[in-house]
Image (cartoon, coloured by chain):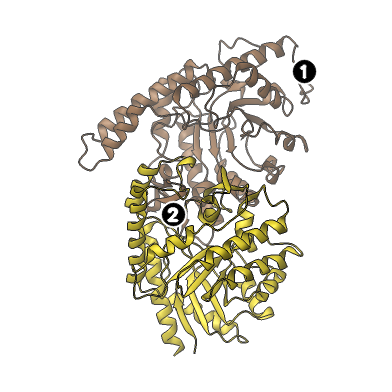
Amino acid sequence: MTEFVATTPGVFPLPDWAKDQLGSLKGHQKEDLVDGSEGTEITDVYEETRATVADWQATAGLDRVVEGQLRWDDMLAHPLCVHDAVETRGIVRYYDNNNFYREPVVSGELTFDGDLADDLDALGELAPDTPTQAVVPGPYSLSELATDEFYGDEAAFLDAIANFLAGEVRAFSDVETVFVLEPSLVTSPPGDGEDERASEAIDRVADATDADVVVQTYWGALTEKVHAHLLDADIDAVGYDFVTNHEDNLYNINEYGTKEGIALGLADGQNTLVEEPEKIAERVAWVDEQTPGAEFETMYVTTNTELFYLPVSRCVEKLEALAAGAARAAEVAR
Amino acid sequence: MSREQFRPADHPNEHFILTTVVGSYPKPKWLDRVRELHDEPEGEFDDGEWEEATDDAARLITHEHERAGLDAVVDGEMRRNEMVEFFADRIEGYEFNGPVKVWGHNYFDKPSVVNDVEYDDSWLVSEFEFTDGVADRPVKVPITGPYTLASWSFNEAYDDDRELTLALADLVNEEIRKLVDAGARYIQIDEPALATTPDDHAIVGEALDRIVADLPEEVRIGLHVCYGDYSRIYPEILEFPIDEFDVELANGDYEQLDVFKEPEFDLDLALGVTDVHVAEVESVATIKANIQKGLEIVPPERLTVSPDCGVKLLPRDVAYGKMENMVMAAREVERELDAGEIEVGAAVADD
């Protein structure tokens, strides 16, 4: 019996009132962004926004609730951008989007920080009836988003980032699921040898928690080799972006198999067009039909990408569609 | 020959390097204040007062451009809030659902295309007529290109961004024909989104074919693309139906200049010669050296100079200083060319 879990890869848009308020409190320049030492006034606003997005998720009826990653001014680069051994430089483009983040330059040893665990703890009892999900950047993506001026070579740098993230994840309080976001595995695929190391790095992060670990890939499909290596990691599910490229993702699954869990990125995190729940359920059923060799224990029903690209009203509607779509998929499967 | 029409009657030198700007200019603080008052639901400023304020600002900045000595001027885009929003607001088929993040706490009202896009009222004709009426110099009209209008919107209605781009290109063509009827002779298509997704240059080319359809020969069409890896769209852009290609190279210290040397660049070049990300006015000597970088690519009669990009984020005195020094530098380079003191690197036409 497959369990259908409606969830998201996190990184929510700030509620509109908080966009204004935080903009005024923090400023609009790159030196004004979150650095891990915000005062109480700013922290209080983030507390309130966290409660707001927890409420969006609980009200929509999602099966997992995330803290929203609302402090992630630099999106997936956040954990490095707030680290003491990292200097942030110019504003650089975030993948192929019209979004930008501060380039983190690692200039010292990446010791334990605790920033992610603190945010997760702050979620606390805000959505007491829904299991909690943590969100972290994948080690490969984080290493691709950053510049190394300390570790010396790519392999050592990836290794250091994996150890750092594993430490951060180990500090998490009880969570049900951890989403590990790895878009760079698709957008700049690791080459020979590097693909194996990327998988080992993910394995190390996954090993740091007892929670179910989902590695979400997006903006296309993995190359066959990268996909095969990813399956070597001891993780519970791989996430596939069926919005951007359903054919190659389906091919990978049918040709190489996948894990017992699967995350289906089948609502578009970057388009305001809100999918009908019925449509979402149909897409879930379609993937199930098209993968006759696979028997899934868990199907995570999610957007393909993070959610901050959307205006708030449409983001909330997407959450509702995901929850209703997953519920409908469960009904159909019964 | 579309370029000589912009040479001022009293131009002091035989050589003529066309000086202009990309478009946007710092808004006077009072205009921002008026916008706030006008935007307030119970605000004390009505539409008529907003129009009066934008007219005043447009007149002021147009004259500021003329005072700096520019050959082709713009009103500094005083009436426009943002390069996509402004147009989306005037095109049927678009709707707004709220702000989205660009970076940090900088947001933009990214619109959604929810129906077929349609041309309603003209977008820029009254802006052009006003500016043209107050300017002594020719007026250039910057207009956001269809690829950027499509890419920086949510596309709910078309199969893909190419379809949406081409539909929007037809509307841009309609607008430009109206502008030309009103007397405009210098149009600049802004396509910053091409820098993000350079593999889409064929879509931009297809859109440009539609944009220039049925336009008279004497209308000068420029294309502005900023912040990108130009090697990914060169030499493909040479096939575009444009007169002039406008690039941002001062910011990268002309590291990408060589991209345009092979194969031969056969369009007119509009070269960024002052850096809009540095809030200091470059010296005339520095700008002269930058202008001469352009002469490595094209002969002087095919060179236009401007700041790298819109200058709206600079302090206003710095923006003015950059234009003033740029014009001085261009005139000095022309004089030195006249006197044979400067070697032209690019092959000069045989005739």
Type of amino acid under label 2: Arg
Question: Relative to the observer, which residue lies in front, B345 or B278?
Answer: B278
Name the image quarter holding residue B19. Answer: top right
Which chain hosts label 2?
Answer: A
Residue B10, position in %: x, y? 56, 10
Residue A140, position in %: x, y? 64, 61
For numbered disc 2, what is the local secondary structure? loop
Question: Relative to the observer, which residue lies in front, B188 or A329?
Answer: A329
Residue B179, position in %: x, y? 46, 34
As displayed, is residue B191 above or below residue A53?
A: above
Question: Relative to the observer, which residue lies in front, B265 or A199?
Answer: A199
The color chain A is rendered in: yellow
The reply to whether residue A8 is visible in this rendering is no
Residue B296, position in %: x, y? 74, 27
Which residue is label 1 attached to?
B343
Q: Residues within 10 Å of mark 1 (few under 14, many from 20)?
A: few
The answer to whether residue B56 is left or right of residue A289 is left
Which residue is label 2 attached to?
A71
The answer to whether residue B287 is left or right of residue A55 is right
Name the residue located 55 percent from the left edge and 37 percent from the top edge: B215
Mark 2 or 1: in front is 2
Name the residue located 23 percent from the left edge and 43 percent from the top edge: B41
The answer to whether residue A301 is left or right of residue A125 is right
Question: Relative to the observer, which residue lies in front, A185 or A264?
Answer: A185
Which chain hosts label 1?
Answer: B
The answer to whether residue A83 is left or right of residue B350 is left
Type of amino acid under label 1: Glu
As displayed, is residue A188 above or below residue A31?
A: below
The reply to whether residue B52 is visible in this rendering is yes
Q: Residues within 10 Å of mark 2 (few under 14, many from 20)?
A: many
Query: What letter labels the chain drawn in brown?
Result: B
